[in-house]
């Protein structure tokens, strides 16, 4: 059963660009990019299930999350769209493109390959659980709690975007952490669906990221045979935040090339 996703819609004409965040992200993380892109096209940024302001629900498989996205497209009467997904969001848009290619004008996949990955979020989950138990009253306290498990300040700042003020005045996590942890094995799997998506595709990867190494490219080409690969050499996994102008330019150039 699909979840009715929260979304932000700039409005406008033509097939929209639908932006899908990664694990523990939200549509809010993409505000500056949406502001730039909306000058030229309609942009819809979504909160996935158990993320942002969307409902919490059991199940984090790619087939389920792609189903949520298709249901949103139907609700907004979007026949076809350009789909942009970062990390986990990239696997979701690949799944949707495999299951319903007629709904996809193009794909933009940011720093993820269509394959399974090893578990690597234990410290992050431990930090978030520690934060929950600590019931911080301000962001300084929240950061101190997270820092006992998560060393990288940039990662802690990213995780802190999931905090909101509760009725009792304490900060709380708005994500469905129980559901995300229960579905973590599915999140680490390859995208769902079979075969290749033959449509136009842009794959952006960070030169300092380990998520899309050269060894992953043969499999990537099998699933996305028409992919154009662009490497942002100075960026890591959060390439859209680390090199925002280069990221925006690459997306615009790709979309403009389709209209030419």
Image: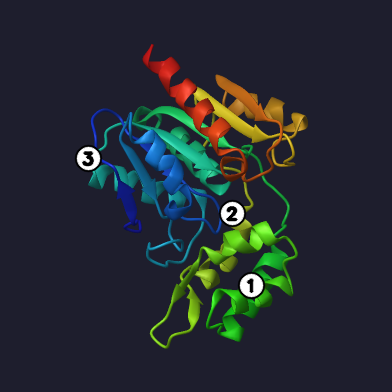
Distance in Å between CA atoms under marks 1 and 2: 26 Å
Which image quarter: residue 235? Answer: top right
Q: Is residue 199 visible?
A: no
**Residue that numbered label 1 is attached to:** 143
Q: Looking at the rendering, in which quadrant would you find the C terminus?
A: top left
Query: Residue shown at 38%/84% (left/top)?
Result: 167
Element carrying mark 1: helix
Residue 87, placed above or below residue 256: below
Cβ atoms under marks 2 and 3 closer than 8 Å: no
Count the marks: 3
Residue 73, placed above or below residue 15: below
Query: Residue shown at 60%/85% (left/top)?
Result: 133
**Residue that numbered label 2 is attached to:** 187
Q: Looking at the rendering, in which quadrant would you find the N terminus?
A: bottom left
x then y, percent, for residue 142: 60, 76
Give the number of the disc on residue 73: none
| Most foreground residue, 243 or 49 | 243
Q: Nearer the viewer, mark 1 or mark 2?
A: 1
x then y, percent, for residue 158: 58, 59
Distance in Å between CA atoms under marks 2 and 3: 28 Å
**Residue that numbered label 3 is attached to:** 77
């Amino acid at each position: 059963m699909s979840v009715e996703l929260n979304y932000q819609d700039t409005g406008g004409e033509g097939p929209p660009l639908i932006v899908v965040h990664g694990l523990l992200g939200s549509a809010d993380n993409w505000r500056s990019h949406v502001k730039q892109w909306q000058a030229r096209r309609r942009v819809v940024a979504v909160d996935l299930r158990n993320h942002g302001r969307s409902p919490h629900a059991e199940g984090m498989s790619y087939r389920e999350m792609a189903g949520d996205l298709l249901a949103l497209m139907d609700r907004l009467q979007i026949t076809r769209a350009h789909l942009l997904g970062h990390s986990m969001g990239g696997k979701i848009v690949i799944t949707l493109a495999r299951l319903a290619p007629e709904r996809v004008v193009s794909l933009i996949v940011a720093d993820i390959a269509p394959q399974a990955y090893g578990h690597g979020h234990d410290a992050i989950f431990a930090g978030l659980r520690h934060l929950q138990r600590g019931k911080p009253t301000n962001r300084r306290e929240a950061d101190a709690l997270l820092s006992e498990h998560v060393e990288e300040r940039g990662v802690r700042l990213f995780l802190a975007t999931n905090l909101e003020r509760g009725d009792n005045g304490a900060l709380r996590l708005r994500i469905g952490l129980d559901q995300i942890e229960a579905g973590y094995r599915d999140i680490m799997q390859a995208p769902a669906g079979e075969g290749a998506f033959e449509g136009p595709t842009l794959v952006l990867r960070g030169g300092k990221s380990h998520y899309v190494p050269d060894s992953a490219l043969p499999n990537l080409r099998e699933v996305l045979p028409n992919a154009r690969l662009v490497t942002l050499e100075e960026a890591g996994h959060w390439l859209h935040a680390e090199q925002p102008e280069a990221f925006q330019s690459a997306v615009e150039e790709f979309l403009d090339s389709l209209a030419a």
